[in-house]
Image (tube, helix red, strand yellow):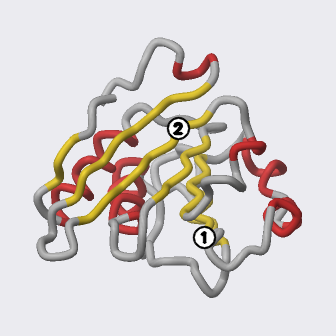
Amino acid sequence: MTPRVLATADDTREFGRSLAESLRAGDLVILTGGLGAGKTTLTQGLAEGLGVRGPITSPTFVIARVHPSLVDGPPLVHVDAYRLGGFAELDDLDLDADLEQSVTIVEWGHGLAEDLSDDRLEVVLEADPETERRTVAVTGHGNRWKDGIPC
């Protein structure tokens, strides 16, 4: 996908809501970007689009949260891999047990979470430090995304 400019935090949430329309149980989304790039804001939009219970906040200190569906859809598993020391610690979370039944979002997952699934979306967010403007690029991997990403 060609990178898209998101002018405000609301635009970032709206992009997440739009992306959520393409997600289903078993999907893995890896979010990459620096501090303040909008990873949690995007996840808030994904959660709204999926219709899961909130609030959605950064799981930095709890590492992972499960947000059950309010609309008979898949739950959202929201993971923050920032404080994890490597794949072994990510594997200890036993995410693969929930992967097929949930939509799993891993913040700071680049270089760690790719082995969880051959089929995944990688979302890279970059923020302009002087404005709210963000750039987002989404890349699909595996057979699930071979025909592209609809948003």
* Amino acid beneath label 2: Leu
Whole-percent x and y of residue 1? Answer: 33, 29
Q: Name above or below for residue 26 compared with residue 66.
A: above
Residue lying farthest to the bottom in this orientation: 61
Left or right, 151 with reference to 39: left
Whole-percent x and y of residue 136? Answer: 30, 48
Residue bearing the label numbered 1: 80
* Amino acid beneath label 1: Asp
Residue bearing the label numbered 2: 121
Whole-percent x and y of residue 35? Answer: 41, 76
Query: Residue shown at 22%/51% (left/top)?
Result: 14
Mark 2: secondary structure:
strand
Query: Residue shown at 66%/37% (left/top)?
Result: 26
Quadrant (top left/top right/bottom left/bottom right) for the C terminus: top left
The residues bearing labels 2 and 1 have C-alpha atoms spaced at a distance of: 16 Å
Mark 1: secondary structure:
strand
Q: Name above or below for residue 151 compared with residue 15.
A: above
Residue lying farthest to the top in this orientation: 147
